[in-house]
Amino acid sequence: MTALEAKQNAKKWIYIGFLLQFGIILYWELTQYVDFFPFNDVVGLSMQENLAASYANDIPKLCIILILWLSLRWMTQPWYLFLYGSSLIYYIVFLGIQLTIWWPRYLFGASPEELKDYNENFARTIKILPKFGNHVPVDLQHNILQTWTLVIIILMFLTLKKLFHAYKLERQSQSGTVSTNG
């Protein structure tokens, strides 16, 4: 595979990343502001709470979309690979936060404060897993968000691998050595 072919291959993955990134932002905004009860329950949220959540979630994701766009031009530059890797780390941390907020409540039980918050905001939404005692399940809205985030992480990891391969091939072609294995 030549450096040019490797770049073209990586670009395909980057375009898929664009779609997933825009999709998760659209999903977040729709489920944050539009009442799809019983899928979500946003009736009690204030505009200030909605805006704070949107800023905290959308600004980093929009920056990552900018990084993806930059990759179409500078995909084999070392500084770009660092930015792309940092974006991947953001999504790993984001998923980690989602998992640590939601899953301990189900696996180990919710504290009285968590149970009160859950009953006020999520008790009437759709769930896949059953509730038992003080063990409260993650609602479907957040199951989808967490799964979507995991898909983005996998795609970004595979894309980063392809970007490193293109970087390596470009450096080899510039130095005059050619390798055909990836």
Image (tube, helix red, strand yellow):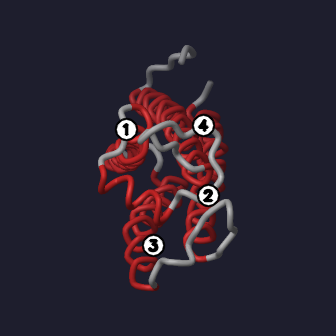
Closest to the observer, 170 or 13: 13
Mark 2 closeness class: few <14, some 14–19, many ≥20 residues within 10 Å? some
Give the mark nearest the N terminus, 3 or 2.
3
Tag 4 and tag 3, C-beta contact below 8 Å: no
**x and y percentages locating residue 6 in the rendered image:** 59, 33
Tag 3 and tag 2, C-beta contact below 8 Å: no
Find the distance from the CA under tag 3 to the CA under tag 2. Answer: 21 Å
Amino acid type assigned to the residue bearing label 1 in the image: Gly
Find the distance from the CA under tag 3 to the CA under tag 1. Answer: 28 Å
Q: Which residue is mark 3?
A: 54
Amino acid type assigned to the residue bearing label 3 in the image: Ser
- At a point 64% along the width and 34% down the height, the residue shown is 5
Discs 3/1, front:
1
Q: Secondary structure at mark 1?
A: loop
Find the distance from the CA under tag 4 to the CA under tag 2. Answer: 12 Å
Amino acid type assigned to the residue bearing label 2 in the image: Thr
Q: Which residue is mark 1?
A: 109
- At a point 62% along the width and 57% down the height, the residue shown is 125
Closest to the observer, 107 or 32: 107
Give the mark nearest the N terminus, 4 or 3.
3
**x and y percentages locating residue 83 in the rendered image:** 35, 50
Residue 155, image quadrant: top right
Q: Secondary structure at mark 4?
A: loop
- At a point 47% along the width and 77% down the height, the residue shown is 45
Mark 1 closeness class: few <14, some 14–19, many ≥20 residues within 10 Å? some
Q: Any mark on residue 125, and which?
A: 2
Residue 128, image quadrant: top right
- At a point 44% along the width and 38% down the height, the residue shown is 106
Mark 3 closeness class: few <14, some 14–19, many ≥20 residues within 10 Å? some
Closest to the observer, 40 or 82: 40
Amino acid type assigned to the residue bearing label 4 in the image: Leu
